Image (cartoon, grey):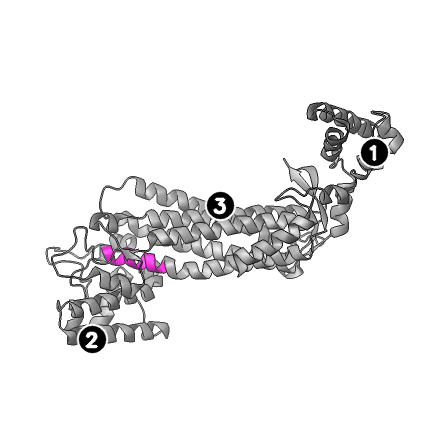
Amino acid sequence: MKKNPSRNVHFSKDPSDLLDEINASIDVDQRLYKEDISGSIAHAKMLGKQKIISKKDSDRLVKGLKSIQTDIDKNKVKFSRSLEDIHMNIENLLLKKIGKVAEKLHTARSRNDQVVTDLKLWIKNNSVELDKELKNFQKTLIKISEKNVDTIMPGYTHLQIAQPVTLAHHLLAYVEMIGRDRSRLKDCIYRLDENPLGSAALAGTSYPIDRMYTTKELGFREPTRNAMDSVSDRDFAIEFIFSLSLIGVHLSRMAEEIILWSNQQFNFIFLPDELSTGSSIMPQKKNPDGAELVRAKASLIIGNLGTILNILKGLPLSYSKDLQDDKNLIFNSYDNLLLSLKVINEILSKSKFNKLKMKEVVENSDSTATDLANWLVQNLNYTFRDAYKTTGTIVDYCSKKKLNLGQLTLEELQSFDKKININAKKLLSATDSVVIKSSFGGTSPKNTKKMIKFVIKKYLK
């Protein structure tokens, strides 16, 4: 087996088995093979264009690299752990394929700028798929919302019933969350869209390279401006994992609600059989395992964010091998997030909502108390604090009588203030309560219909 060309002649002994075990990254970074080959092709073309190597040699390198990608795509390649990483594996494959000219490929570059270029390209490429799945999730939420503009459900604060809302209003809150996630991801990609190739080890190179050329070839916005920062920077990796973490948090919040809503005490949602599990001992159980695992995956991604922050915080400039673990953290975070996104999307798209139960819960609560207080302010010239106290007294009366506000007669309401009339009693209806929440961003069906049109145009077009 060919020795790793990165082991220089001044090493008198080969690395120990233990060093090989901790040092090799090919099991992880082989996922970068397409990006590594793309970067190498751009570099080889640039070397030829700048006459750093001959045009003939440049063409042979490009042809050989393309052939290697075809071989890998067809599963004809077995990577070697003794060659440490994807970069040395591909260089060795190229040497076998085109001979000694392959050794010219590494002219004017280092693995330091090579790996960060590969990683940036990988994040850019895979963010396209991620944004597509985020958009699909928004589409599912909007589709359900369109059918539930008038579906009454309890809105919660502190997990206590607060005020009536609609299911559409509730789900559109997640559309906004995911919209911010997509925007945040876009900003992250914009900031990382600088080409580090040509920074070499940390100081640049004396060869007359053309970094503008490789920047254009690889689709970067512009080249990085400081070689030392270029090879040691992992801000983009941290920001990417942070973006994934926050998406994971949003999915986890939705998962938590699905778990609660599917519980018998809520009974707001019927989960699809194919996305639920049973118990090994209790035949009646229908467990929301998919949602629970989405909730757990968010914790893993958040943990990865903490890990990469801790790795970077103690590193002097410029490159240190500690940075090798960034790829495992990025791949793990991305894989878990993408899977979670697909799972939660499928759960929601295949679930059915118990509309009668949701409305029943609202009607059997005192969730319209704020509407009564507001009516006293708007119609009887109460200060809000006086209205709040009067309404609180009425709610206390209901509690003692084991009634809810909607069950009170007009005569009972007038026992607290003779000026209260039938219009106030109408507001104690959950449906009327929702309709009058017409302020911008409110839950009224009229508002919600407008918002659905807006988010379709903003996020789906």
What's the residue at 31%, 48% (across, down)? Answer: 234
In the depicted structure, whether residue 299 falls above or below residue 207 = above
- Mark identifier at residue 403: 1
Q: Which residues are magenta?
A: 113-122
The Cα–Cα distance between marks 3 and 1, rounded to whole angstroms, is 43 Å
User: Residue type at mark 2?
Assistant: Asp
Residue identified by numbered label 3? 299
What's the residue at 65%, 53% (across, down)? Answer: 449
Q: Earlier in the sequence, mark 2 or mark 1?
A: 2
User: Residue type at mark 1?
Assistant: Leu
Q: In the shown orientation, is residue 127 left or right of residue 56?
A: right
- Mark identifier at residue 59: 2
Q: In the shown orientation, is residue 205 left or right of residue 21?
A: left
Q: Earlier in the sequence, mark 3 or mark 1?
A: 3
Is residue 225 shown in magenta?
no
426 vs 318, nearest the viewer: 426
Q: Main secondary structure of the magenta part?
A: helix
